[in-house]
Image (cartoon, helix red, strand yellow):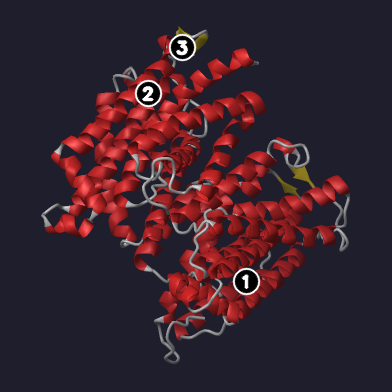
């Protein structure tokens, strides 16, 4: 049994890196807009389909689809926040939650209608070439995803701390009124932030597709894991999301190993309930709920 | 429960005329469809207690709905217990689950989005558990033996089932109205409007919120049991699935959260709309949810108090603040 633990931990870490990437987008949106985006998983599903169709119809390798899908999804996220979520929710937190929930329903069910519930996956032979590490054999696709996600987090952090736009985003997050007074366009900044969050999802989708599958329901699974990651890491904390994502990947993998594959995710949800109950401020969160 | 304006009177009358007209229709399709809508209306009324009066929007009412349904099904199928006792046990189980989730969530001061997320997570954990253990029938679910009769609470005649459901919905609404105008209702609304002020006035807000979750859980458990008795079959995706939780919140928001008639009217309206769309779009799966979601977004933007709130402004009978049936 003990010989199985290390490979399980490593495989959990590679999955966890993707969870972290999805959660980075979500936590960024929460940290700045203070909204929980229920449609985050649905946008991931949409990005997975986009990468899938690019591969099937145009033969674009999912990794080469990254430069195409990142800007497309940034614009999509920008437009959604600017022209749908913000105007429709009239500023109330509960309404934002409900509008994004409605958005998730629309995207998921339209996907079900147009693309049916069939499970689809792409066939990229090299993605399943194994890499040996400490006696564990990991698919190449997962290893690439792990390192790419690990690289994306500091890049995002540099963007937030070193650029003017990043500073504007942080200013709006801390003091909306004050930021408005010094001339920052708050609605534009909110929408940019939502766009970046959505672009994170597009990146995660491109990294995920070679070793994963896509169905219209895949978003729902991911959004719950992403919520857990965000809450565990501390709402709005980028490094927190990264650590929490890796941790949850390992928890899921170990639960799957000890309790059986179908119960793997239950560890994540139990962790979720426990964190929400006992430490809602998360690992690296600054303030409580 | 009385309408406060001409508009509300017309809205309520329309709902009653529709419900009554089903007795005179020759096609059983409409009655079967409305039976489903009435079961959903009971969960919607359950959501309305916490989400409407208490201002605590739950995204996981399936947790209590499914617990009620499973408690009753397990007692009947695995232990051969009488359907009437199982019926009561389902309601109690729903209430207990509601109180449990509420007690845990409110002890740590969770509200707003955190409360929504924790309820959602509970429903999801229960769904995975129900599909994994033997006592709940695992992935294949539980099936009641077909034995029509008063002692098994199973009825062949659609009209009988429909009448029983109408009576139950009326009872739940009467209870809602009674709660609303009781001391407890006043406390609950005070908690929604300003929790800190309510606490400063000496209201034990924690107790009130947990009690609201228990009552809401009892109603949701009741709805779950009704589903079981009508369809005789449940599985984890059907009773613990997110569709239940979503339908539970959309109806009241569109009809008017925190009103007695809103959840019923919203749910009936949505189901009629969904059914109409199904016929137009040739039974496309999931499209009714797209429609619900679009209506939800529009309602949030343009009808902040739902249909009952809109109707309250048409032909007001008498001036009375903050009171729309």
- Crowd around label 1: few <14 · some 14–19 · many ≥20 (10 Å): some
Nearer the observer: mark 2 or 1; the answer is: 2
Q: What element carries label 1?
A: helix
> If you read the primary sequence from the N terminus, does the residue marked by circle 3 or circle 2 appear first?
3
Q: Where is residue B173 in the image (x, y as percent from the top left)?
A: 62, 74
Which chain is disc 3 placed on?
A
> Do circles 1 and 3 both sit on a common chain?
no
Mark 3 to mark 2 CA distance (whole Å): 13 Å
Location of residue B100 by image quarter: bottom right
Which chain is disc 2 placed on?
A
Q: Is mark 2 on a helix, strand or loop?
A: helix
Mark 2 to mark 1 CA distance (whole Å): 53 Å
Which chain is disc 1 placed on?
B
From the image, tell me which residue sits under label 2. Answer: A207
Left of A106 or right of it: where is A119? right
Which of A283 and B256 lies nearest the eye of the viewer? A283
Q: Which mark is residue B260?
A: none
Mark 1 to mark 3 CA distance (whole Å): 59 Å
Q: Residue at x 39, y 63 (%)?
A: B300
Q: Residue B19 carries which label?
A: 1
Q: Can residue B280 be seen in this snapshot?
A: no
Residue with the most extreme bottom position: B318
Q: Is residue A227 above or below residue A260?
A: below
From the image, tell me which residue sits under label 3. Answer: A128
Q: In this view, does A196 lie above or below B266?
A: above
Q: What element carries label 3?
A: helix
Q: Is residue B235 above or below residue B320?
A: above
Location of residue B29 by image quarter: bottom right
């Amino acid at each position: 049994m003990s010989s199985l633990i290390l490979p399980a931990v490593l495989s959990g870490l590679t999955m966890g890196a993707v969870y972290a990437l999805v959660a980075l987008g979500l936590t960024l949106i929460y940290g700045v807009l203070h909204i929980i985006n229920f449609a985050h998983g649905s946008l991931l599903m949409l990005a997975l389909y986009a990468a899938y169709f690019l591969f099937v119809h145009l033969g674009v390798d999912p990794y080469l689809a990254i430069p195409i899908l990142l800007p497309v999804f940034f614009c999509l996220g920008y437009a959604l926040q600017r022209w749908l979520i913000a105007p429709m929710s009239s500023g109330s937190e509960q309404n934002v939650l409900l509008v994004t929930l409605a958005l998730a329903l629309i995207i998921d069910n339209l996907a079900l209608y147009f693309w049916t519930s069939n499970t689809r996956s792409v066939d990229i032979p090299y993605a399943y070439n194994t890499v040996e590490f400490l006696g564990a054999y990991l698919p190449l696709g997962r290893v690439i995803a792990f390192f790419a996600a690990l690289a994306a987090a500091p890049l995002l952090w540099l963007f937030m701390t070193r650029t003017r736009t990043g500073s504007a985003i942080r200013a709006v997050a801390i003091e909306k009124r004050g930021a408005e007074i010094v001339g920052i366009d708050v609605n534009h900044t909110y929408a940019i932030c939502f766009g970046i969050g959505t672009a994170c999802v597009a990146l995660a989708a491109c990294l995920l597709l070679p070793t994963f599958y896509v169905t219209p329901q895949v978003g729902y699974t991911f959004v719950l894991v992403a919520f857990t990651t965000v809450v565990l890491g501390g709402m709005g904390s980028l490094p927190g999301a990264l650590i929490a994502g890796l941790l949850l990947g390992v928890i899921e993998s170990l639960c799957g190993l000890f309790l059986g594959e179908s119960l793997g995710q239950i560890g994540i949800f139990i962790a979720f309930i426990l964190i929400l109950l006992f430490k809602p401020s998360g690992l690296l969160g600054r303030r409580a709920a | 429960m009385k309408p406060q304006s001409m508009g509300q009177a017309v809205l309520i009358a329309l709902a009653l005329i529709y419900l009554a007209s089903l007795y005179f229709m020759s096609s059983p399709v409409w009655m079967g469809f409305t039976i489903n809508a009435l079961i959903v209306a009971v969960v919607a009324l359950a959501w309305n207690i916490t989400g409407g009066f208490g201002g605590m929007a739950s995204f996981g009412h399936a947790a209590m709905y499914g617990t009620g349904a499973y408690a009753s099904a397990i007692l009947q199928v695995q232990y051969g217990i009488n359907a009437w006792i199982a019926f009561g046990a389902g309601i109690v189980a729903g209430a207990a689950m509601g109180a449990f989730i509420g007690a845990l969530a409110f002890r740590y001061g969770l509200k707003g989005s955190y409360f929504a997320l924790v309820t959602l997570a509970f429903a999801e954990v229960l769904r995975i558990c129900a599909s994994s253990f033997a006592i709940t029938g695992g992935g294949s679910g539980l099936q009641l033996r077909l034995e029509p009769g008063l002692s098994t609470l199973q009825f062949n005649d659609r009209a009988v089932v429909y009448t029983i459901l109408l009576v139950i919905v009326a009872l739940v609404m009467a209870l809602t109205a009674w709660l609303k105008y009781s001391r407890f209702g006043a406390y609950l609304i005070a908690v929604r409007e300003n929790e800190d002020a309510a606490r400063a006035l000496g209201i034990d807000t924690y107790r009130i919120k947990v009690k609201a979750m228990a009552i809401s859980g009892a109603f949701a458990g009741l709805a779950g049991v009704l589903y079981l008795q009508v369809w005789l079959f449940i599985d984890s995706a059907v009773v613990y699935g997110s569709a239940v939780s979503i339908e539970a919140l959309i109806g009241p928001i569109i009809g008017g959260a925190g009103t007695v008639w809103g959840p019923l009217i919203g749910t009936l309206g949505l189901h009629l709309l969904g059914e109409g769309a199904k016929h137009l779009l040739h039974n496309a799966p999931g499209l009714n949810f797209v429609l619900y979601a679009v209506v939800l977004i529009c309602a949030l933007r343009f009808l902040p108090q739902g249909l009952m709130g809109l109707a309250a402004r048409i032909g007001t009978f008498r001036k009375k603040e903050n009171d729309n049936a």
